[in-house]
Amino acid sequence: MNFAALARSAALVTAVALLPATTAGLARVEGSAGPEFAKLFAVYQRVKASYVEPVEDDVLINGAISGMLAALDPHSAYLDGSDLQRLETMIDGNYSGLGLSVVGEDGAVKVISPFRGSPADEAGIKAGDYITHIDGELIYGLDLDEAVARMRGQAGTSIRLTVFRPGREEPFDLDVTRGLIELEPVTWELQDGNIGHIMINEFSRDVGSDVFAAWKDLQTQATGRLNGLVLDMRSNPGGSLDEAVALSDLFLSKGQIVSQRGRARGESISYDAETVFRGDIAEDLPIVVLIDAGSASASEIVAGALQDHRRAIVMGERSFGKGSVQSLLPLGRDAALKLTTARYYTPSGHSVQEGGIKPDIRVPQLSDPDLASRMKFTMRESDLRGHLINELGIKDEDLESDTRTDPRFQLTAEELEAQGIEDFQLHYAVETLRRTSPRSVASRTK
C-alpha cells in the first residue's frame, strides 16, 4: 500500500485534512492519565496470560486503539490494511463490485447509499436497507471489512443479497451482477426548456473543475441561453473540503463560503469566495440545489453557502447533518488516525451538526413507492450513537419534519409513473425553473 501517495491526495471532509503527527506530540501524555494507562496495561497482561487461546500483540493493540476512538464519535477511526485500501479506492474511484456505501450498525450492514448508475442502484437497493445475507449465508455480526470483501468480486459475476427494508414486513432477495465501478463524481444532462442538470455524486479530486466543464458543455448543448440550473447533490456523502469550496466559489463572487473551528492551533479557518474561481460563472441565472437525507458533509457546505448568500433555492429534504471535520494523521507508513478535529459553519454562522441544512422548499420524493414507510426509518447524523452534540442544544422536536399535508404533493408513485415522471424531486425543481425563466415570465406578462 503506497501510503505516501495517499497522503499526497487532497484533504477529505467527509472532510479529511492531512496533518503531521510528530513522535513528541504523540508521546505527550498528561500525568493524570498515568493510572488509566496502568489499568490498560493490566488488562493487556491478563488477556495475554489467561485468555483461552493465544492472542497476538497486534490484535490487542489495534483493538485497544479502535475502542478508544469508537468512544469519541462515529467518524473517528484507526485505519490500516483494508481500511486504508478502501480510502485509497474512494480517492481513485475504480474497483470491481456493487457500488455501495455501507456502514456497520450494531453488527448489521446498513446501506448509506448506492452510487448512481451502479449495479446496486440498478438492482433497486436503497439508502437505509440492511443486508442480512450474502448468497444465503447470514452476515449479521460479521466484521464489516469481511462483509465488504465478500460483496466485491470480479466484474460480471453474480451475487445474491438478502435485504431487510424498514417498512416492509418480510426480507427479500436481490440478484446483483458485479461491475467495474468507475465512480463519476460529476454527470450532467440538458433538460427540456434549456434547464441544465448537474449531478455531483461525490467530492473527489477536481470536482470544481468538472462542474465548470459540465457548465461549458451545457451551454453548447442549449438552443440559446440556459434558463436555469439544477445542482443535484442528493445521496452525496461528501468528500474533499477543498472541492466543496471550489464548487461553491464557481457560483459566488464575494463573501465567506464556510468556516471551521477546532480546539488545536491551526484548526480554525475561514474559506472565502474568489480564492479558487473568479466571478460567478452563471451570473443572474436561477439555481436550484437538490438535497436529501443522504446529502452529507461537503454537500452541506455547498448547499449552506449558496443558501445563505441567497444564490440558490434549496429543495428536497433536510440533509444528513454531519458538521464535523476529520483529519488524517499518519501513524508510520501503513496506518493512520482519522480524528474529528473541528466543526464547520455556514456563512451565517449556522452549525450543520445534527440539524443539517433545511431546504427552502421541502419536496418529498413522491416517486418512491416506499416513501411513507421509509421516512419513519431515515437515518441522519443525530441518530448515530455517540455523535457530537450541536453546541446550540437543538431539541429533537426542532429537527422533526413538517408533516402537514401539502396540496402540491398528493400524487402517488403509481400516478406519477403513469405520467412518465420517474424522479419527482428533479421534475419539481425543473418545472419551478421553467416557470421562473425570463422567457416564461415575459410570455405571461404580455
Image: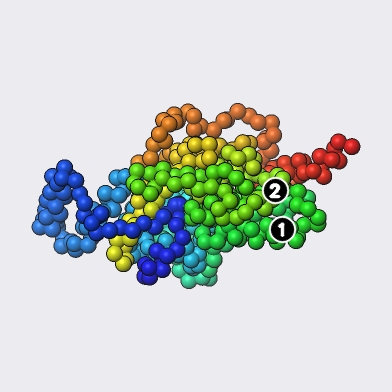
- Residue 63 pos. (x, y %): 25, 55
Amino acid type for the residue under numbered disc 2:
Glu
Instruction: Judge from the rendering whether residue 172 lies leftward or rightward of residue 47; answer left or right.
Output: right
- Residue 192 pos. (x, y %): 77, 52
Q: Mark number for residue 218?
A: 1
Please report the residue visible at 20 percent of the width from the left and 49 percent of the height from the top: 29
Q: Secondary structure under badge 2?
A: loop
Please tell me which residue lies in front, 257 or 220: 257
Please tell me which residue lies in front, 166 or 396: 396
> Image quadrant of residue 424?
top right
* Marks 2 and 1, the one that precedes in the sequence: 1
Density class for disc 2 (Cα within 10 Å; few <14, some 14-19, many ≥20) is: few
Q: Secondary structure under badge 1?
A: helix
Q: Quadrant of the C terminus?
A: top right
Please tell me which residue lies in front, 246 or 51: 246
Which residue is identified by label 2?
283
- Residue 236 pos. (x, y %): 53, 51
Density class for disc 1 (Cα within 10 Å; few <14, some 14-19, many ≥20) is: many
Please report the residue visible at 51 percent of the width from the left and 41 percent of the height from the top: 346
Please report the residue visible at 75 percent of the width from the left and 52 percent of the height from the top: 226
Please report the residue visible at 44 percent of the width from the left and 47 percent of the height from the top: 269
Residue 53 at least partly seen: yes
Amino acid type for the residue under numbered disc 1:
Leu
Disc 2 to disc 1: CB gap under 8 Å: no
Instruction: Judge from the rendering whether residue 94 lies leftward or rightward of residue 28; answer left or right.
Output: right
Say if 389 sits above or below 148 in the image. above
Q: Quadrant of the N terminus?
A: bottom left
Which label sits in the foreground, 2 or 1?
Answer: 2
Q: Specify the farthest residue to the right.
A: 446
